[in-house]
């Protein structure tokens, strides 16, 4: 389970996470992310380095420099400090969205009584079997189309997105079908 969720605004240009640090002087893409567990910002990308600040779950910060599993946080996104620092990041949590959408998701999930795991999946833009239509719509946005599907004595609703089709039954998401490139 990753310590952080980070969202690359320009994931296509972000390159491989395993590569070295991004050079901010050549217009590296901004990386946005939401803290999923409390984390301490460090002076250097090392757990033994002095602590500079503490982030709480659902804090949104950004940075442009990645180095061996660490992200240098832009000081402008840290409340109460002008000092930049490094936080550990988990590559498994990479998702793509805009800052505005990310902030909207964070705000909306904090208003719910959903379990923490569901909240973080929705913020990350991920869905699972059993999710409600509200959870799917918040995680993925509005579908391109909606249709009814008959199966035996049951009727299911299906939502189609660019890359997947979501099938709902009376209990929530019943199937997630990946679509071939269109």
Image: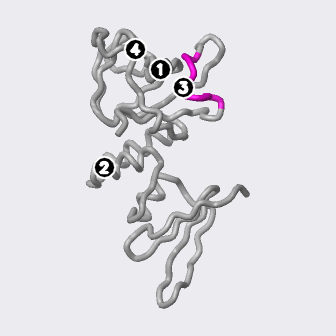
The residue tagged with tag 1: helix, strand or loop? loop
Q: In this figure, what is the number of numbered marks?
A: 4
Q: Residues within 10 Å of mark 2 (few under 14, many from 20)?
A: few
Is the Cβ of the residue at disc 2 closer than 8 Å to that at disc 4?
Answer: no
The residue tagged with tag 3: helix, strand or loop? loop
- Report the predominant secondary structure element of the magenta stretch: loop
Is the Cβ of the residue at disc 1 closer than 8 Å to that at disc 4?
Answer: yes
Q: Residues within 10 Å of mark 3 (few under 14, many from 20)?
A: few
Q: Earlier in the sequence, mark 1 or mark 4?
A: 4
Q: Residues within 10 Å of mark 1 (few under 14, many from 20)?
A: some
Q: Earlier in the sequence, mark 3 or mark 4?
A: 3
Range covered by the magenta-colored residues: 13-22
The image quadrant where one finds the N terminus is top left
Which numbered marker is on residue 18?
Answer: 3
Residue bearing the label numbered 1 = 68
Kindly report the distance in space between the C-alpha atoms of the residues bearing marks 2 and 4: 34 Å
Q: Earlier in the sequence, mark 2 or mark 3?
A: 3
- Marks 1, 4: nearer the viewer: 1
The image quadrant where one finds the C terminus is bottom right
Q: Position of residue 118 (x, y in %)?
A: 34, 52
Q: Position of residue 45 (x, y in %)?
A: 40, 14
Residue bearing the label numbered 4 = 45
Kindly report the distance in space between the C-alpha atoms of the residues bearing marks 2 and 3: 36 Å
Q: Is residue 73 magenta?
A: no
Q: Is residue 104 above or below residue 164?
A: above
């Amino acid at each position: 389970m990753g310590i952080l969720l980070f969202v690359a605004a320009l994931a296509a240009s972000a390159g491989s996470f395993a590569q070295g640090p991004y050079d901010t002087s050549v217009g590296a893409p901004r990386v946005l992310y939401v803290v999923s567990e409390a984390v301490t910002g460090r002076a250097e990308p090392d757990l033994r380095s002095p602590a500079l600040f503490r982030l709480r779950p659902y804090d949104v910060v950004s940075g442009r420099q990645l180095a061996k599993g660490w992200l240098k946080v832009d000081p402008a996104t840290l409340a109460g400090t002008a000092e930049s620092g490094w936080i550990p990041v988990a590559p498994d949590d990479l998702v793509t969205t805009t800052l505005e959408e990310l902030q909207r998701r964070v705000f909306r999930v904090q208003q719910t009584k959903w379990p923490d795991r569901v909240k973080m999946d929705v913020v990350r833009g991920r869905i699972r079997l059993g999710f409600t239509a509200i959870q799917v719509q918040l995680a993925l946005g509005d579908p391109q189309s909606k249709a009814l599907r008959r199966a035996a004595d049951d009727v299911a609703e299906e939502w189609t997105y660019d890359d997947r089709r979501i099938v709902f039954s009376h209990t929530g998401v019943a199937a997630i079908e990946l679509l071939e490139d269109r």
